[in-house]
Amino acid sequence: MPSIALVIEFDGTDFVGWQIQDNGRSVQEAVQTALSELYKEDIKVTGSSRTDAGVHARGMVCSAKVPFNIPADKLPLACNALLPPDVAVVRAIDVSEGFNARFDSLGKRYVYRIVHDRVRHPLLRRYAHFVTGRLDVEAMNEAAACFAGEHDFTAFCAAGGSQNTTVRRLRSVEVRADEQTGVIEIEVTGEAFLYNMVRIIAGTLLYVGQGKIAAGDIPAVIESRDREKAGKTLPPEGLTLEEVFYAPDLHINP
């Protein structure tokens, strides 16, 4: 059977997350339903990761085996005609039979967005976390650099995860601020992540910006492995899975 990879964009506001669950609509179910209708056969898809309820994606990747070939340039339009308006296929790639979107992933890039202003911005409320008061972005950037490398991230893991180890390697953590829009972006790139890890890192960097945690204290917080010493878990609407990385020969990344 032919195998395909799909790059998916979705607004996670009204989903319970990527994975199929009993308590509401999931992105996985929406994609499987559309593909099953398109191919007139039951199609199962494997996602590159499990996003939580309310988390968005610009570059989620999923894979599936299909009964026949549809040209990769035609497949997104065919799928999107059958998908709800808050999820879309943006690219399709023909892949080898053994490709698995989850296990072949080499890493992911997330961005957590914070709107920093005196007043709320309703048009951004679905895609960013709103805060008031002064934020020291320079201190946030200084603290962000401390997360790069391999560490035990127990202090940045919410209860309920199913990981075998809490050691993870982050390629980079950076903070960018747009003074005109008031949007602060916390970009986290790594090989794999713990449960709510990016949202807790973002919450910790927010505490640094607010002066609740000193930038120089971050290495000690990591070393402590104590969840109580890190910042709060920021809400899901600010988080977007921007990109999933694969080997260049797969041609999944632009």
Image (spheres, helix red, strand yellow):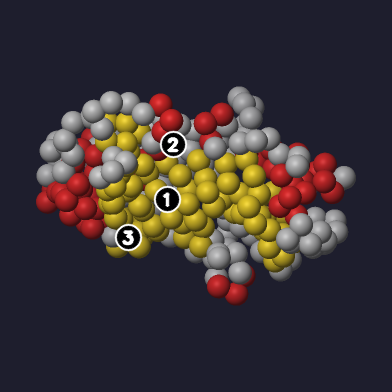
Q: Secondary structure at mark 1?
A: strand
User: Extreme right residue here?
Assistant: 40
Q: Which of the two residues, 138 or 211, is positioned nearer the viewer here?
A: 138
Q: Mark 3 Cα within 10 Å, few/some/many (few <14, many 20+)?
A: some
Residues under labels 2 and 1: Cα distance? 13 Å
Q: Residue at x 27, y 48 (%)?
A: 177
Alpha carbon distance from label 1 to label 3? 11 Å
For badge 1, the amino acid type reads Tyr
Residue indicated by mark 2: 127
Numbered badge on residue 47: none
**Label 1 sits on residue:** 110
* Residue in view at x 69 percent, y 49 percent: 45
Question: Element type at marker 2?
Answer: loop
Q: Amino acid at mark 3?
A: Ser
Mark earlier in primary sequence (1, 3): 1
Q: Residue furthest bottom?
A: 249
Question: Which badge, 3 or 2, is on the more N-terminal residue?
Answer: 2
Instruction: Identify the residue position indicated by label 3 in the image.
Output: 172
Question: Where does the image place residue 239, in percent across and percent down from the top left?
Answer: 42, 41
Q: Residue at x 76, y 57 (%)?
A: 74
